[in-house]
Amino acid sequence: MGRLNGGTNAGKQHFSHDHILKLIANPTETLTCNACEQPNNTNKPFYGCNTCQYFLHENCFNAPRFLNHSCHPSHPLTLHHPPYAGGYYICNACGSDGNGFCYNCAACDFDIHLQCASCPSSILVDKHTHQLELHFGSPDEDKDSKYVCDICFVTMSNDNWLYYCAGCDFASHLYCAITSPEVGVFPKQQHPNPNPNPNSSQNSNVNEVVDMINSVNDDHDRLIAAQIAAQIDAQSRRAMLDLF
């Protein structure tokens, strides 16, 4: 399976698994990550439970439990793991189903793959000379306009994310543009929000709360932090109402 870090490898606990996961520094066989469902193509470290054959990329192991993503500015997203109702979820970013981890907003029934949450805000691809920008839906003012992927030539859903060069009208699916995603690496600024939220002070509070929750390790303290987050959110909304 690979080399464990000798006798000093005490392992770490992850919220998704009951057993301690040991660091596999140099995997020597193909392991599939239970979080992103991707293999270890780059020979990067894994955390694993050999008894259960449960493995996580190191990046996926360290993915934040709560994520403030510009694709969904109204609420922080929470990291979930299977099982799911119906056995899978549908990713709102790429449109495909998933059985691994997802970032979820329960209030909005919004789910995205771990790797889709990691998509860079811009990218260069072999098929095009210019940089492509990430869009959280159709870049056209007419949201009914259809786009065809210029890499695989399949018509894309208007509801899904895409990479796009406006100057050349060149569009691409996420998975056509990113053939080997760097899963679990989250850019601090994903993409400008096409519909800015006027409640900027409320968003600032949410950002601070997400940072606070992610800094807490103990599950009980996380629960308390989440309750504080809800109170701050409620206070922000009341403050906004007082302005009218």
Image (spheres, rainbow, N blue to C red):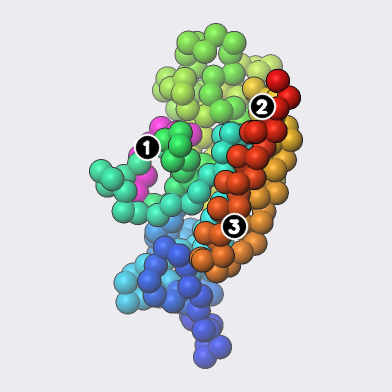
Quarter location, residue 218: bottom right
Which circle marks residue 241 in the picture? Answer: 2
Q: Main secondary structure of the magenta part?
A: loop
SS for dot 3? helix
SS for dot 1? strand
The amino acid type found where label 2 is placed reads Leu
Q: Which mark is nearer the camera, 3 or 2? A: 2
- Residue located 53% across and 24% down the image: 137
Relative to 80, 43 lies left or right: right
SS for dot 2? helix
Q: Is residue 220 visible?
A: yes
Q: Is residue 126 visible?
A: no
Residue furthest to the front in view is 242
Q: Position of residue 73 (x, y in %)?
A: 61, 34
Which quarter of the image is occupied by the N terminus?
Answer: bottom left
Q: Which residue is mark 3?
A: 225
Q: CA distance from mark 1 to mark 3?
A: 29 Å
Label whose residue precedes the other's in the sequence (1 or 2):
1
- Residue located 70% across and 27% down the image: 242
Q: Which residues are magenta?
A: 92-99
Q: Which residue is mark 1?
A: 90
Q: CA distance from mark 3 to mark 2?
A: 25 Å
Label whose residue precedes the other's in the sequence (1 or 3):
1
Q: Position of residue 171 (x, y in %)?
A: 55, 23
Magenta-drawn stretch contains 94: yes
Q: Position of residue 59 (x, y in %)?
A: 56, 60
Q: Residues within 10 Å of mark 3 (few under 14, many from 20)?
A: some
Q: Tell whether label 2 touches label 3 (CB within 8 Å).
A: no
Which quarter of the image is occupied by the C terminus?
Answer: top right
Depth check: give the residue in front, 218 or 148: 218
